[in-house]
Amino acid sequence: MGHALTALFRRELKIARRSGGGASTGVVFFLVLAAIFPFAVGPDLNLLARIGPAILWIATLLSMLLGLDRLFQADQEEGSLDLMLMSEAPLELIVLTKCAAHWLTTALPLVIVAPLFGLALAQDVPALGRVTLSLLAGTPALSLLGAVGAAVTVSLRRGGLLMAVLVLPLTIPVLIFGVSAAGAGAADPVPFAAPFAILCALTLAAVAGAPFAAAAALRYGGE
């Protein structure tokens, strides 16, 4: 079973690399969003420093949604989803493996470049550290919640919009505490540890529950 999951993980990485991956597209989209916001709010550096963490988090969330509807849809179109449903490996672990590959190829590049874009938003070094830590802790939850939406809409040809409508409300708690942790100490008196601990708890809850929800949706769609 472990060999099969490892092979699946490597397959997902190769597919992401061969298709150009969501990494480059997501980073470019992230750059566009991060560049547009300063023009929208004006040259007030104090305002940019205050809302910078929220901008980076929103840009990360929207960038991760790009192509997420294809997480299972491509497997269904080529028939490999049926093999996954009949595999000896638990479908929940298969979902978790695909989410791990999605996070590695899509979210991790965004976490790496976020501090660079944060400099354009007047973020100081401590603020950049808080943003990076909060993104590291919260982006796995975004991938897992996105997998649930992708599984629900797997049988729809153009389910990207519906998936976004389903997923975005689920991501609000992650977004709230992610921004709270990233902005703590700048203009917010709330300590960093409290929202960061809740953010970690939300990610652990997503790890515990999202694979089961996504697997149930895939089984229902395969019937």
Image (spheres, rainbow, N blue to C red):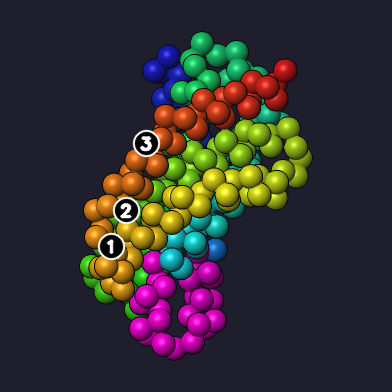
> Mark 3 = which residue?
204
Q: Residues within 10 Å of mark 1 (few under 14, many from 20)?
A: some
Q: Nearer the viewer, mark 2 or mark 3?
A: 2
* Residue type at numbered disc 3: Leu
Asked if the residues shown at circle 1 and circle 2 are in contact, with their CB atoms under 8 angstroms apart, the answer is yes
Dot 2: element: helix
Q: In the picture, which quadrant includes the C terminus?
A: top right
Pinpoint residue 130: horizontal percent, then vertical percent: 28, 61
The answer to if 5 sits in the magenta stretch is no
The residue pinned by badge 1 equals: 190
Q: Secondary structure at mark 1?
A: loop
Crowding around mark 3 (Cα neighbors within 10 Å: few <14, some 14 to 19, many 20+) is: some
The amino acid marked with disc number 2 is Pro
Magenta span main SS: helix
- Sequence-first tag of 1 and 2: 1
Left or right: residue 207 versus residue 62 is left
| Circle 2/circle 3 CB separation < 8 Å | no
- Where is the N terminus found, in terms of image quarters? top left
Among numbered discs 1 and 3, the one appearing first in the sequence? 1
Q: Is residue 41 visible?
A: yes
Q: Which residues are magenta?
A: 30-53
Residue at numbered disc 2: 195
Q: Position of residue 85 (x, y in %)?
A: 60, 18
What kind of element bears circle 3?
A: helix
Quarter location, residue 47: bottom left
Compared with 90, 188 (above or below) is below
Query: In the rendering, at what x and y percent does residue 153 appear?
Result: 69, 37
Question: Is residue 131 in sight in this rendering?
Answer: no
In the rendered image, the residue lying farthest to the top is: 88
